[in-house]
Amino acid sequence: MIRDGYVVTWQGREYDAVPDADNVRVYAAQPADGFDEVKPGRYVRVLSPDEYDDLVYVRTVCSWRGAPFLVLAEADNWFRLEYTGGRAPIARQMGLEEFDFGVYQAWAPAHEISDLMEQRI
């Protein structure tokens, strides 16, 4: 599973989360006590800082062709990657698309990806 966003640990479970001023909104796919349905299959609960154990940012990273990348998406055994090596000449040499100024991305076949892991910040 490719993750990129905040995660809260609450009552021994991880939830997708969004900081909201001093509080955190946590989301669940199933109904649960204290959660309100915001749309079908999406439930939210607001927690204050003293209610949850941990708030971290999680992102998925990998290596491709020996260079470091952030994984943005996955579709049909392909990964959408963003180069994080910080060297434009290398990004250009690899044939990456300049998505924005200094931001290089590409689609890569899953079988060429290595060191796929979650990074907690």
Image (cartoon, helix red, strand yellow):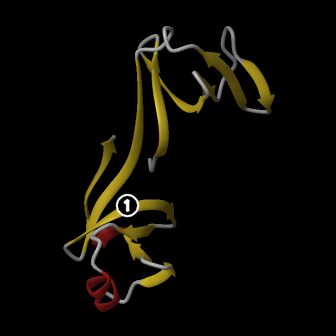
Please state which of residues 119 and 101 is positioned toward the viewer in this rendering: 101
Q: Residue 3 location, x and y as percent?
A: 46, 46
What's the amino acid at mark 1? Leu
Is 110 in front, or is 48?
48
Tag 1, which secondary structure? strand
| Residue at 64 percent of width and 29 percent of height | 29
Residue drawn at point x = 69 percent, y = 9 percent: 34
Q: How many residues crowd mark 1 within 10 Å: few (<14), some (14–19), many (20+)? A: many
Q: State the quadrant of the C terminus.
A: top left
The image shows residue 81, relative to residue 30, as above or below, that is below
Residue found at the far front of this picture: 21
Q: Is residue 78 left or right of residue 91?
A: right
Asked if residue 63 is positioned above or below residue 89 in the image, the reply reads above
x, y (%) of residue 105? Answer: 44, 75
Vertical placement of residue 56 versus 9, above or below: below
| Horizontal and vertical percent position of residue 61 | 33, 56
Q: Quarter of the image holding residue 104?
A: bottom left
Image coords of residue 60 (percent x, y)? 37, 51
Left or right of 22 on screen, residue 115: left
Q: Against 62, is 29 above or below?
A: above
At 46% from the left edge and 84% from the top edge, which residue is drawn? 97
Q: Residue at x 32, y 66 (%)?
A: 84
- The residue that mark 1 highlights is 70
